[in-house]
Image (cartoon, helix red, strand yellow):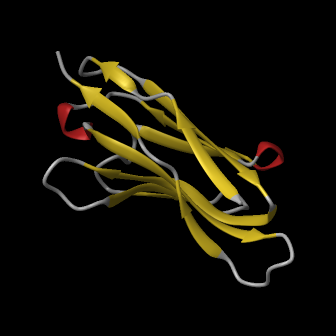
Amino acid sequence: QVQLVESGGGLVQPGGSLRLSCAASGSISSINTMGWYRQAPGKEREMVALTTNSGLPNYADSVKGRFTISRDNAKNTVYLQMDTLKPEDTALYYCHARIRKISQVVYGYYWGQGTQVTVSS
């Protein structure tokens, strides 16, 4: 079994900051891509930020310059530092990882259950 557990969501005022964390656990052999997606009510899920196992980041245009993704490979954990938050950042944020389980050859795609981020005054 593989699990992704997110933490760090909450309510914040516009211009504020939050830090999300996501830890992967279970029968993990290796992790390739880790990152974050989000889904606002009535909208499709969209990529926010991803990072490879070498740390190379990729950001959605809407969050460039405000969000920073980082990763601790020793802890199988990915972080998302969100600064200068805007009301339009309000969404359910999902952790995502491409993981190869022990004794398997192929990578599978795994999702966390989501953590709510609400930006409102």
Residue reaching furthest to the right: 103
Tally the numbered discs: 0
Q: Is residue 15 left or right of residue 10?
A: left
Quadrant of the drawing holding the N terminus? bottom right
- Residue 100 percent location from the top left of the image: 74, 72
Residue 22 seen in render = yes
Residue 57 seen in render = no
- The residue sitting at 78% across, 50% down in the picture is 73
Write down the quadrant of residue 108 in the picture: bottom right
Q: Is residue 19 left or right of residue 26?
A: left
Q: Is residue 40 left or right of residue 97?
A: left
- The residue sitting at 19% across, 32% down in the picture is 87
- The residue sitting at 79% across, 66% down in the picture is 30
Quadrant of the drawing holding the C terminus? top left
- Residue 75 percent location from the top left of the image: 79, 43
Residue reaching furthest to the front: 1
Write down the quadrant of residue 31 in the picture: bottom right
Residue reaching furthest to the bottom: 105
Q: Is residue 44 above or below residue 20?
A: below
- Residue 63 percent location from the top left of the image: 34, 46
- Residue 28 percent location from the top left of the image: 79, 61
